[in-house]
Every structure is written in C-alpha cells, then in structure tokens.
Image (spheres, rainbow, N blue to C red):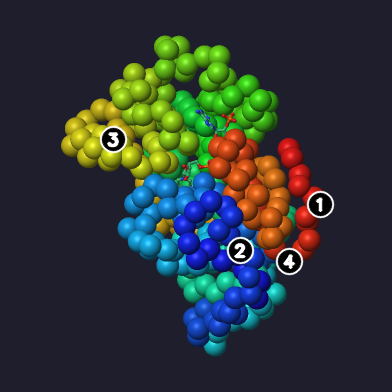
C-alpha cells in the first residue's frame, strides 16, 4: 500500500510517500480502506518532535511509529474472524490515538477501538474532520467542564478545529456562546452559532467586565492566571495545550473550592459512544463539518506547512485514493 512514511524528526520534507507493508488484521481487527484523514497541529508536533517531550513518548532518536495520522474515515475492507460489529463495505470513522497510521491507504484497528459507522449524510472528509475537533470539544465541554444549559461559555481560538466545533457543541448544549477570533473569522464563528464574536485584534475579553461559567482556550494562548478574572465564582478554565503552569494550577485548584483550571488529553477518552453521539448531531443538522483545505496524500508536506501557520479554520483534510492535486478548496 501507499503510505506517508516518517523515519526521522524534522521539517515537513521528512514526510515521504512510499510503499509500505499492507497491514494484516488480527482476529479481532478490521482493515479499513482509508479515504480521508486529517492533518492537525499534533501531527506536526509528532513529526518535528516539538515539544521535546514527544521524543520521550514516541521515540528518543526517531519516531517509533513511522506512519503518522490519527483521525480517519473509510470503508471496512476485511474483518478478522472474531469481528461481529462490522462487515466489509461499512463506511466508518474513528481514531487511532495509540498506533497512528492514518496517513496511508489502509489501517487495521481492533473492533472495540473508537470506530463507528459514519453519518449517513457525511462525506469521508467531513467524517474525518469530526473525529478531530468535534471529538475533542465534546470531551472538554461535556465531560470535563460539565457544560449546562444557560451557562455563559467563551471559546478562545474559536475558528480553529477544536474552537469551531466547541462553538457548535456549546450552542447545542444550550449555552450562551462567545467566540474569540481574528477579524477574518468573525462571520464564520457567528455562522457556526456563536451569540457573540470578539475580535481579539481589537478587544481583550479579559478587560470587558464580562464573566463566564466556562472559558475554553482551544489554542493554548491565554493562561489560567490571565483568564481567572473573567471566570464566575465557580467557573472553569480549560486549555487544550499542556504546560507546567496548567498542571500546577490544576493540582492547586483541585484542592480548593472556587475557580478551577483543567487540561485533559481527549484522545485517551474517546469511544464509540462519542462517535455515535456526533453521528446523530451531524445527521440531524445540529453540527456541521468545517473543512478549510483538502490535499491529496502526496501533498502532505504542503498540508503540514499550512497547519503549522496556525491559521487554519476548522479542519485540513487529506483525501486518500483519489487525485485531488488540483482541487485545493478554501472556505
Ligand atoms: N488536549 C487535547 O486532547 C487536544 C486535542 C486536540 C487538539 N489539541 C491541541 O489544541 C490546539 C488547537 O488545535 P486545533 O486543531 O484547534 O488548532 P488549529 O485549527 O490549528 O488552530 C488554528 C486557529 O487558531 C487561531 N489562532 C491562532 N493564533 C491565535 C491567537 N493568538 N488567539 C486566538 N486564536 C488564534 C487561528 O485563528 P485566527 O487566524 O483568527 O487567529 C486559527 O483559526 C493545538 O495545540 C492542538 O495540539 C489538544
């Protein structure tokens, strides 16, 4: 099969389209023919070993997993003899947080992995996109912050992948949603359900006197100390980016009443139920996929370069198995 192979850490140029061994499903596994996958800031971190801690977990000298990519959508091509929940031809979406491998034509996953049938009305690209920001947003807002109807929720970095799905999910859960983004993305953030949108190049939300039940910093640009004054008395600050600071604040605020600081690694908390939940929301039109750009597998270095600008809106998607070299779509 064709795959993007990463044998050393470095710039996007280390990513090479190569022939790789076809994965063979174990008895409890399915083999998925991948049609779409995402490129995320995490993929860029794993590729570049930045931050350094990546090396401690994923290989000190070189990456242990040579094929990157976590979120995928495709079709079940074959199934091991013990698999009962899927059959060849099922259209599926899901994640492979431990072994990666989504930037390839095929991937084997255990039947009980976070894998489910994709929304009936979704393209493979849309389904892969949901596996990125929407799954993350769900774990942060519903499971970590216990979002409630009527709460005031502020999403910082509202136009990125985590941000734009957080806006939509907070809206779905009945919150009053404020999105913070740059001027260029104000209309997008409002169109995705934000009641208010603040342009961070013109105004600082921490200085406007408003307080929120939940502040989700989806891009890790504002600290707990920075946001504390904008939290209600029992408000929660969440960040998607792990730092020593957030770990210390998390520990400290877990021992006291009042305002809390929280980080979570959402990939470790995913399951079929979350995917089925998103499928239902997508099928009933309660959330939409936001796809900024599409690249073909052989354009993956270009996709990494774009993601590394930190300016993508929603998802960047890799379309596998079809030549989309001339179809880069901008929203
Ligand atoms: N903890 C977890 O489980 C988990 C899961 C998924 C992702 N993450 C992490 O979460 C972070 C966000 O991921 P993502 O995929 O959502 O990122 P992303 O899509 O690449 O974020 C890009 C967006 O960030 C916005 N942005 C850039 N600088 C900003 C600033 N100073 N203030 C406000 N917005 C800014 C940009 O909007 P403008 O152009 O309008 O500025 C752009 O739309 C990454 O670090 C990722 O690794 C963590």
Mark 2 touches mark 3? (CB < 8 Å):
no
Mark 4 and mark 2: Cα distance apart in space: 16 Å
Vertical placement of residue 167 versus 75, above or below: above
Report the Cα–Cα distance between label 4 and label 3: 43 Å
Residue positioned 35% across, 32% down in the render: 236
Relative to 27, is 295 on the left or the right? right
In front of the other: 281 or 82: 82
The quadrant of the image that shows the N terminus is bottom right
Which residue lies at the image location 39% right of the left edge and 47% below the top edge? 51
Position in image of residue 27 (x %, y %): 50, 85
- Helix, strand or loop at label 1? It is loop
The residue mark sitting in front, 1 or 3, is: 1
Residue under numbered circle 3: 245
The residue positioned farthest toward the left in the image shown: 255
Residue 278 position (above or below residue 60): above
The earlier-in-sequence mark between 1 and 2 is 2
Q: Which is more toward the observer, 299 or 327?
A: 299
**Which residue is the site of mark 1?**
326
Label 4: which secondary element = loop
């Amino acid at each position: 099969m064709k795959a993007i192979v990463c044998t050393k850490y470095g710039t996007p140029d280390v990513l090479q389209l190569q022939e790789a061994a076809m994965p063979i499903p174990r008895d409890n596994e399915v083999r998925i023919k991948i049609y779409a996958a995402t490129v995320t800031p995490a993929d860029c971190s794993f590729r570049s070993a930045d931050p350094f801690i990546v090396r401690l977990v994923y290989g000190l000298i070189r990456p242990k997993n040579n094929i990157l990519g976590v979120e995928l959508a495709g079709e079940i091509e074959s199934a091991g003899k013990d698999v009962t929940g899927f059959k060849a031809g099922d259209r599926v979406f899901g994640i492979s947080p431990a072994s990666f491998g989504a930037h390839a034509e095929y991937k084997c996953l255990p039947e009980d992995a976070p894998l489910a049938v994709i929304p009936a009305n979704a393209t493979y690209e849309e389904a892969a996109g949901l596996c990125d920001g929407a799954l993350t947003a769900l774990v942060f807002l519903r499971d970590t912050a216990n979002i409630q109807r009527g709460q005031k929720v502020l999403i910082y970095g509202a136009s990125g992948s985590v941000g734009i799905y957080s806006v939509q999910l907070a809206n779905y859960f009945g919150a009053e949603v404020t999105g913070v983004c740059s001027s260029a993305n104000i209309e997008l953030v409002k169109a995705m359900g934000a009641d208010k949108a603040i342009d961070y190049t013109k105004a600082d939300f921490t200085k406007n006197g408003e307080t929120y039940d939940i502040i989700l910093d989806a891009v890790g640009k504002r600290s707990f100390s920075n946001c504390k004054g904008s939290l209600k008395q029992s408000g929660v600050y969440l960040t998607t980016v792990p730092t020593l600071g957030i770990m210390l604040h998390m520990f400290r605020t877990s021992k006291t009443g009042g305002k809390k600081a929280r980080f979570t690694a959402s990939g470790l908390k995913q399951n079929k139920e979350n995917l089925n939940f998103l499928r239902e929301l997508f099928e009933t039109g309660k959330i939409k996929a936001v796809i900024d750009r599409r690249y073909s597998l052989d354009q993956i270095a270009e996709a990494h370069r774009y993601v590394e600008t930190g300016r993508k809106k929603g998802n960047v998607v890799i379309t596998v198995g079809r030549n989309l070299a001339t179809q880069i779509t901008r929203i």
